[in-house]
Image (spheres, grey):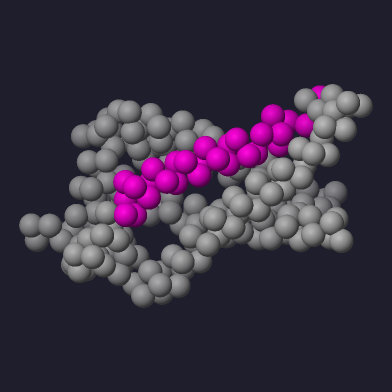
């Protein structure tokens, strides 16, 4: 029963991980618009921020997925550590696994701390403006405010540095988590596993690098 429960948790964690990786791609795509076309970024941000489907269906699912993913990860980590105590007495854990796989909880908690900062910087002010102050216009002095708010946040070098460090930890988390998610749902084949490993490396590097680029770009260009 315990083994079955652990497998179920791993599958659930993989499924929430897939959803969160999809969200990362979507979020990065929108953020990159702020570099390419501020006007388009404003329009897309306003649409996402006022669309019923995104606000009242996908956003709650996203918050649930974040919480569930990290809670499940901590439960699995606690169980894994109890079993490692015996295994490490026989085998050298560092020789048989990567730093990323042994420290997913560290990178995960760092990413969670980043999300808390990100919520403080963007999500809470947005919710306050729209649902407490009841201003759904997205306008300040007759113009959309989203691009200017983004640029303003990235003028603080300490905040930018914290974001970049968080993106590095996100990369470390994804480099193992991407491939691990496929294995957890049983997608493990000699023909396709090497492809998944390459995709894992590409996703784990390109996506966090893209987020870091946006932060640094706005810091240096304004």
Q: Residue pushed farthest left?
A: 141
Q: Is residue 75 visible?
A: yes
Task: Locate residue 79: give its quadrant.
Answer: top right
- Residue 182 location (% of width, % of height): 73, 54
Which residue shows up at 46% across the image and 66% down it? 60
User: In the displayed structure, does residue 101 sit left or right of residue 206?
Assistant: right
In the rendered structure, does residue 123 fall within the stretch colored magenta? yes
Above or below for 103 versus 20 = above
Above or below for 181 versus 211 = below
- Residue 58 location (% of width, % of height): 46, 68
Which is more toward the observer, 15 or 4? 4
Q: Residue pushed farthest bottom?
A: 52
Marks counted in the figure total 0
Which residue shows up at 32% across the image and 54% down it? 124
Secondary structure of the magenta portion, mostly?
Answer: helix
Quarter placement of the C terminus: top left
Which is more toward the observer, 130 or 79? 79
User: In the displayed structure, does residue 215 sit left or right of residue 10?
Assistant: left
- Residue 35 location (% of width, % of height): 31, 45
Give the magenta part as a residue range: 95-124
Which residue shows up at 49% across the image and 52% down it? 24
- Residue 112 location (% of width, % of height): 50, 44
Which residue shows up at 85% across the image and 28% down it? 88
Quarter placement of the N terminus: bottom right
In the rendered structure, does residue 118 fall within the stretch colored magenta? yes
Q: Residue pushed farthest right?
A: 90
């Amino acid at each position: 029963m315990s083994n079955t429960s652990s497998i179920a948790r791993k599958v659930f964690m993989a499924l929430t991980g897939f959803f969160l990786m999809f969200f990362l791609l979507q979020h990065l795509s929108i953020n990159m618009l702020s570099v390419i076309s501020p006007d388009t970024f404003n329009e897309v941000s306003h649409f996402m921020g006022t669309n019923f489907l995104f606000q009242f269906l996908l956003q709650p699912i996203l918050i649930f997925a974040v919480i569930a993913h990290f809670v499940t990860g901590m439960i699995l980590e606690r169980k894994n550590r109890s079993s490692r105590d015996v295994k490490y007495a026989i085998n050298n854990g560092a020789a048989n696994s990567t730093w990323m796989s042994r420290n997913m909880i560290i990178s995960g908690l760092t990413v969670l701390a980043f999300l808390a900062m990100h919520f403080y910087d963007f999500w809470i002010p947005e919710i306050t403006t729209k649902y407490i102050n009841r201003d759904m216009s997205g306008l300040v002095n007759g113009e959309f405010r989203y691009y200017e708010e983004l640029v303003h946040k990235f003028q603080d070098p300490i905040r930018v540095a914290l974001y970049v460090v968080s993106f590095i930890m996100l990369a470390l988390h994804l480099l193992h988590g991407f491939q691990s998610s496929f294995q957890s749902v049983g997608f493990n084949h000699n023909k396709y596993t090497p492809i998944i490993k390459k995709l894992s490396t590409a996703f784990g590097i390109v996506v966090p690098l893209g987020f870091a680029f946006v932060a640094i770009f706005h810091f240096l260009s304004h």
